[in-house]
C-alpha cells in the first residue's frame, strides 16, 4: 500500500523537461529541448513555450593569457560591482557564482525573479541569466540549477553551435 501511495505521489509531480546539448563558442550546456532559441548581438536566448521564462547565455574570451580561474571570476564579479548576494560555487570544474534578484512592478501586480550564474576557467568567461515569473519560480529555479550544473568547457564543434 505504501508503495502504491509513493507511486501516486511521484506520478503527480510535473514531468521533467527534456534537455538537449547546446554549444556556445567554448561552452557546452544542456537547455530545455522545447525552448525556442534565437540570437541577437552575440547573446543566445532560449524562450520557454509558455512565455513564463527565458534564458540568456553570453560567452567571452579572457584577454589575458595564463589568468587563474579564481582571479578571473573575481574580476568578473568586480566588473559587476561586487554587489551582495553572490554565492560562490563550482560549475564545469571551475569557479562560478550565483545570485538571485526579484523585481516587482510598482503596483505589486507582477514579479519577476532573475537567477544569474557567472563563471570563468581562466580562458572563457560566461553568464547564464534566467528570467522567470515568480508564480512559476519553484519549477524554473530547479530547471535553472539543472542547466547551470550541465555547464562544461569545450572546444567549438559544428553541432547546435551558437554564434
Image (cartoon, rainbow, N blue to C red):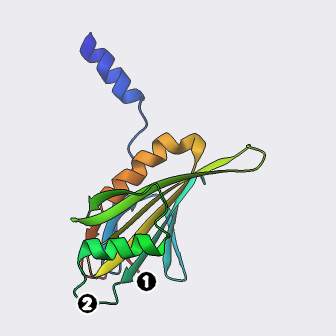
Q: Nearer the viewer, residue 159 or 39?
A: 39
Q: Position of residue 80 (x, y in %)?
A: 49, 71
Task: Say which quarter of the image contains residue 149.
Answer: bottom left
Q: Earlier in the sequence, mark 2 or mark 1?
A: 2
Q: Nearer the viewer, residue 146 or 70?
A: 70
Task: Say which quarter of the image contains residue 51.
Answer: bottom right
Task: Name the secondary structure under disc 1.
Answer: loop
Q: Position of residue 38 (x, y in %)?
A: 52, 73
Q: Nearer the viewer, residue 105 or 57?
A: 105
Q: Which quadrant does the C terminus fall into? A: bottom left
Q: Position of residue 71 (x, y in %)?
A: 29, 75
Q: CA distance from mark 2 to mark 1?
A: 23 Å
Counting other residues with Cα less than 10 Å from the Cα at mark 2, is it few (<14), some (14-19), or many (20 or more)?
Answer: few
Measuring 43% from the left and 37% from the top, which residue is drawn there? 14
In-image side of 111 versus 152 (left or right): right
Measuring 55% from the left and 83% from the top, which residue is drawn there? 41
Does the rendering let one see residue 78?
yes
- Check the image and name the residue furthest to the top: 1
Does the rendering let one see residue 23?
no
Q: Which mark is residue 65?
A: 2
Q: Position of residue 124 (x, y in %)?
A: 31, 79
Above or below for 60 versus 89: below
Above or below for 90 versus 4: below
Q: Which residue is mark 1?
A: 163
Q: Nearer the viewer, residue 90 or 12?
A: 90
Amino acid at each position: 500500500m505504501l508503495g502504491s501511495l509513493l507511486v501516486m505521489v511521484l506520478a503527480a509531480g510535473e514531468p521533467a523537461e527534456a534537455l538537449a546539448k547546446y554549444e556556445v563558442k567554448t561552452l557546452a550546456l544542456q537547455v530545455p529541448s522545447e525552448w525556442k532559441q534565437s540570437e541577437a548581438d552575440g547573446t543566445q536566448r532560449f524562450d520557454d513555450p509558455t512565455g513564463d521564462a527565458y534564458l540568456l547565455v553570453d560567452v567571452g574570451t579572457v584577454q589575458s593569457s595564463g589568468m587563474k580561474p579564481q582571479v578571473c571570476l573575481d574580476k568578473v564579479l568586480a566588473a559587476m560591482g561586487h554587489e551582495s548576494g553572490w554565492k560562490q560555487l563550482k560549475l564545469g570544474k571551475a569557479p562560478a557564482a550565483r545570485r538571485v534578484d526579484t523585481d516587482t512592478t510598482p503596483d505589486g501586480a507582477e514579479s519577476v525573479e532573475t537567477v544569474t550564474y557567472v563563471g570563468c576557467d581562466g580562458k572563457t568567461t560566461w553568464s547564464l541569466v534566467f528570467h522567470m515569473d515568480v508564480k512559476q519560480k519553484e519549477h524554473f529555479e530547479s530547471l535553472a540549477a539543472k542547466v547551470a550544473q550541465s555547464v562544461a568547457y569545450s572546444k567549438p564543434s559544428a553541432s547546435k553551435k551558437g554564434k
